[in-house]
Image (cartoon, rainbow, N blue to C red):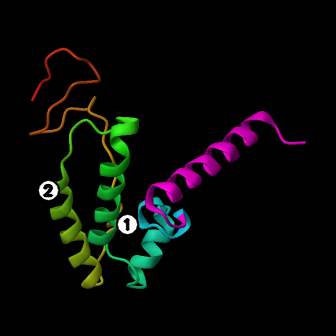
């Protein structure tokens, strides 16, 4: 018998994979925007993927889905592209850091120099 927590986890993973496939018209298991960090790092080492390409796939995913899910408030794509280029260079030089090339979204409840911080509030933001 499957417990409720395992069922809900499996159901959410299936739904996410189905949405991903519909959003891009291809199998989500091969879309770099949906690959787990462990597979991305392996493919970076094998030179089958590069941080800039993965970032561009993630940006495309954000641009496609953000109107529906409204989860990205401020887009710092130029900064992310610069960081991805630097990561790609370190991979090419054979000197990547531990999670080099893995991108994350940062909640805007943490103040970051030069970024607007709203903490999810409609009140005036802090820069």
Callout in the foreground (2, 1): 2
* Residue 91 spot, x, y in % from top left: 29, 79
The numbered mark at residue 78 is 2
* Residue 34 spot, x, y in % from top left: 47, 59
* Residue 92 spot, x, y in % from top left: 26, 84
Q: Quadrant of the N terminus?
A: top right
User: Residue at image x 68%, y 44%?
Assistant: 11
Residue 95: image quadrant is: bottom left
How far apart in space, not on screen, are marks 2 and 1 (Cα)?
Answer: 23 Å
User: Residue at image x 20%, y 32%?
Assistant: 111
The numbered mark at residue 3 is none
Q: Is residue 26 shown in magenta?
A: yes
Please report the bounds of the magenta region as a residue range. Answer: 1-27
Crowding near the residue tagged with mark 2, few <14, some 14–19, many ≥20 C-alpha atoms within 10 Å: few
Frontmost residue, 14 versus 42: 14
Residue 124: image quadrant is: top left
Frontmost residue, 80 versus 29: 29
Looking at marks 2 and 1 on the same chain, the residue that comes earlier in the sequence is marked by: 2
User: Residue at image x 36%, y 54%?
Assistant: 61
The numbered mark at residue 98 is 1
Q: Secondary structure at mark 2?
A: helix
Image-based side of 56 in relation to 77, left or right: right
Frontmost residue, 96 versus 65: 65
- 119 vs 72: above or below: above
């Amino acid at each position: 018998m499957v417990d409720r927590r395992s069922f809900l986890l499996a159901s959410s993973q299936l739904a996410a994979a189905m949405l991903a496939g519909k959003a891009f018209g291809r199998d989500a298991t091969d879309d770099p925007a949906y690959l787990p960090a462990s597979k991305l790092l392996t493919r970076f080492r094998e030179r089958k993927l590069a941080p800039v390409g993965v970032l561009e796939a993630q940006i495309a995913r954000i641009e496609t889905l953000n109107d529906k899910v409204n989860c990205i408030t401020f887009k710092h794509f130029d900064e992310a592209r610069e960081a991805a280029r630097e990561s790609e260079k370190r991979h090419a030089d054979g000197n990547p850091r531990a999670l080099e090339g893995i991108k994350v979204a940062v909640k805007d409840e943490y103040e970051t120099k030069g970024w607007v911080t709203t903490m999810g509030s409609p009140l005036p933001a802090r820069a």
